[in-house]
Image (tube, rainbow, N blue to C red):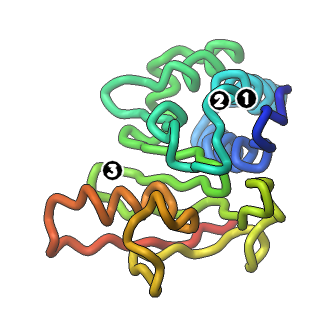
């Protein structure tokens, strides 16, 4: 597996994203342990290959749309490819996975939203180290809560690298100012 790219590691983020998706297969499906292991390894390899030239720890939001895993009326092609490797049909994948899922895999943060109006939940968060190399998981065992408030940080996400891509989306692209966006921690 390509765990490193020219600008830093992506292994913890990919592991968190794939682990999240794999839990759905374990809980909902008639998928045996060997299939789960194959799906996990396949999706990790597929994502690492797909992201290797689109991973920018110095600018985590750059390439975020490219790295987004999306399941709605269409199955994400990378998830579908891993599902095919264990013999699942697209119909089976739709039954096993949430019907409306957005999963963001960004340097230093992995988060998801189920449903178009669902809350954005953080699966994995770490702090950037010098030269954009992660120093390790944030407090609380690698899972940390994000908030939509600025906490005194600059409102220009491009100037403050500590604002995540999801926070940037909420600050810059919110269509309804009165709508509350909840950020919560997911541990597991």
Q: Is residue 168 left or right of residue 173?
A: right
Contact, CB < 8 Å: mark 3 with mark 2?
Answer: no
* Position of residue 42 measured from the top left corner of the image (x, y, whole percent): 75, 23
* Position of residue 4 measured from the top left corner of the image (x, y, whole percent): 83, 35
Which circle marks residue 115 in the picture? 3
* Position of residue 158 measured from the top left corner of the image (x, y, whole percent): 46, 57
Q: Is residue 97 left or right of residue 40?
A: left
Q: Nearer the viewer, residue 58 or 149?
A: 58
Q: Which residue is mark 2?
A: 51
| Quadrant the C terminus occupies | bottom right
Q: Residue at x 79, y 43 (%)?
A: 8
Q: Is residue 117 left or right of residue 169?
A: left
Chain-order first, disc 3 or disc 2 = 2
Q: Residue at x 50, y 35 (%)?
A: 69
Is residue 10 visible in the rendered image? The answer is yes
Q: Nearer the viewer, residue 102 or 80?
A: 102
Q: Which residue is mark 1?
A: 48
- SS class, disc 1: helix
Contact, CB < 8 Å: mark 1 with mark 3?
Answer: no
- SS class, disc 2: helix
Q: Residue at x 51, y 48 (%)?
A: 61
Against 164, residue 48 (above or below) is above
């Amino acid at each position: 597996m390509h765990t490193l790219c020219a600008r830093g590691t992506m292994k913890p983020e990919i592991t968190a994203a794939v682990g999240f998706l794999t839990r759905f297969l374990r809980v909902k499906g008639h998928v045996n342990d060997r299939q789960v292991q194959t799906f996990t390894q396949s999706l990790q390899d597929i994502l690492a290959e797909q992201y290797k030239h689109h991973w920018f720890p110095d600018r985590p939001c750059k390439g975020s749309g490219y790295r987004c895993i999306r399941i709605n009326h269409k199955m994400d092609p990378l998830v579908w490819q891993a599902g095919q490797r264990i013999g699942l049909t697209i119909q089976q994948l739709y039954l096993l996975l949430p019907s409306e899922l957005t999963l963001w895999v960004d340097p230093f943060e992995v988060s998801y939203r189920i449903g178009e109006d669902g809350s954005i939940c953080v699966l994995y968060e770490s702090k950037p180290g010098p030269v954009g190399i992660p120093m390790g998981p944030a407090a609380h065992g690698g899972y940390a809560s994000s908030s939509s408030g600025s906490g005194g940080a600059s409102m220009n996400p491009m100037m403050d690298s500590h604002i995540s891509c999801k926070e940037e989306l909420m600050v810059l692209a919110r269509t309804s100012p009165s709508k509350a966006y909840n950020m919560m921690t997911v541990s597991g």
